[in-house]
Image: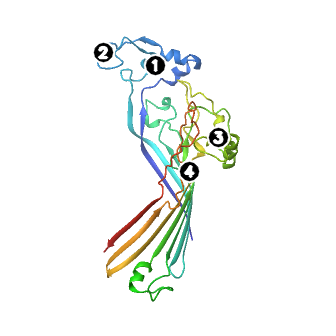
Amino acid sequence: MDASYVGNLTKKLPVSLNQNFIPLDILNSITQADRAAYFNARVANPLAGLLPNSSLNGVTVPRQQLLFAYPQYSQVTITDVPIGSQRYDSLQTRVTRRFSKGLAAQVAYTVSKTLERVTVLNAQDVNLNNLLATKLEKRLYQFDVPQKLAAVVSYELPFGKGKRLGNNFHQVLNGIAGNWNLNVQYVRQSGFPFDFPNAAPLQARSAKLSNDQRQELARQNGRERFDPSFDKWFDTSLFPTRSLAPFTLRTFPTRFPDVRSEGLRSWEISVFKDFVIKEKLRWQIRGDFQNAFNFPFFGALQSSDVTNSQFGQLRADITNQPRLIAIVMKVTF
C-alpha cells in the first residue's frame, strides 16, 4: 500500500494581454444605460488621412477608438507576458498485490485539484504601466479531474505447457490455446469543468443538477429518461435570456467551479502471447480492446450562450474514442 502527496507549481506561464481598451475610470464615469450610445457614437477622426490602407483612416471613428492606448491600431496585443501560473495538488493512493499462479492486481485512487491563472477577467484588469502587475483570474484548469479510480488486473491464463490445465497439450494445440496472458484495466474519473455562461446568474446559488434532478426534468418534458439532445445538463433557469450588455464589466467567473461534464469510464482489455524463437528473440501476438464496452462520454456543451436555443445541452456526439479492436503482431529482441 502506498499513499503520497504530489504537487506541482508552475510559474511564469505566457499570457497574452490586450492593450486597447476603454480605461476603467472613463468606463465608470458613464452610466450603464448610456454606454453603448456614448462609446459607439462616431466623432471626428484626428488621424484621418494619416493611416493609409486602414479601416481607421476615415473622417469619423467610434469614440471608444480614441480612448484606447494605441488609437492608431484596431487591436494591440502583447503576447508571452510571463505572469501566468498553475498549481496542482493531489493525494495519490495505490494498493498492489501479487497473487500466486500468475495473478496480480493494482488499484489506484487520486484526489486532486488544478487551478490556473492565465487570463484576465476584464480587459480593464491589464496594468498598462506595469504588465507584470496585471491581476489574473483564478479558476479551475479546463482538464481538472478531482477524482480518478484506476484498477488493473493481469493474469497468466492457466492453460498450456507448464500450467495447471493443458500441460499435455499437443504442440499445435498449445500454440493456439496455451500460455495466453490477460490484462484488464478499468478507469473511472470525474468530468471536466464547463465554461460559465455569458451572463451573470440571477441568484447566488449553484447551477449544478443531480442525476435525479435531470431525470425528473426529463419526465416533466415528456421523456422517460434524460436525453442530452433535448434536456439541460445544468439549471439554465438561473441565468437571464440576454447576454452581458456591451461595455459591462464582468463580475462572474469564466468557468464553473462545480458544473462538469459527466464522468468518464472505460474498460481496456488486452490478450497476448509470446513465442520464444530463441533466447533474446520473441514473437508476440496480441489483441487490444480499447473502450471494450463502448461507454460514451459526452464531454462538451452545445452552447454556453444564454441566447442560444441549445444553451445548457450536451453535445450528442461522444468526445471519447468508440470501441476499437486492434490485432497486433510484433517481434522483440
Crowding at label 3, few (<14), some or many (≥20) Cα neighbours within 10 Å? some
Mark 2 → mark 4, Cα distance in angstroms: 53 Å
Q: Secondary structure at mark 4?
A: loop
Residue positioned most to the bottom: 168
Discs 1/4, front: 4
Foreground tag (2 vs 4): 4
- Mark 2 and mark 1 lie on one chain; the one further toward the N terminus is 2
Q: Which residue is mark 3?
A: 207
**For the C terminus, which image quadrant?**
bottom left
Q: Which residue is mark 4?
A: 191
Q: Which mark is residue 50?
A: 2
Secondary structure beneath disc 1?
Answer: helix
User: How many residues crowd around disc 4 within 10 Å: few (fewer than 14), some, or many (20 or more)?
Assistant: many
Amino acid type, label 3: Ala
Closer to the camera: disc 2 or disc 3? 3
- The residue type indicated by label 4 comes to Gly
CA–CA distance in space, label 2 to label 1: 19 Å
**Neighbourhood count class around disc 1 (C-alpha, 10 Å): few under 14, some 14–19, many 20 upward:** many
Is mark 2 in CB contact (under 8 Å) with mark 3? no
Question: Could you say which is closer to the camera, residue 240 or residue 78?
Answer: 240
Residue 281 position, x and y percent, is 31, 78
Instruction: Check the image and report above or below for 62 versus 199.
Output: above
Residues at marks 2 and 1 touching, judged by CB atoms closer than 8 Å: no
**Pick the front one: 318 or 225:** 225
Circles 4 and 3: CB distance less than 8 Å? no
Task: First in sequence, mark 4 or 3: give its number.
Answer: 4
Q: Is 278 left or right of 124, judged from the image as shown? A: left
The percent position of residue 123, horizontal first and vertical second, equals: 48, 30
What is the count of numbered marks?
4
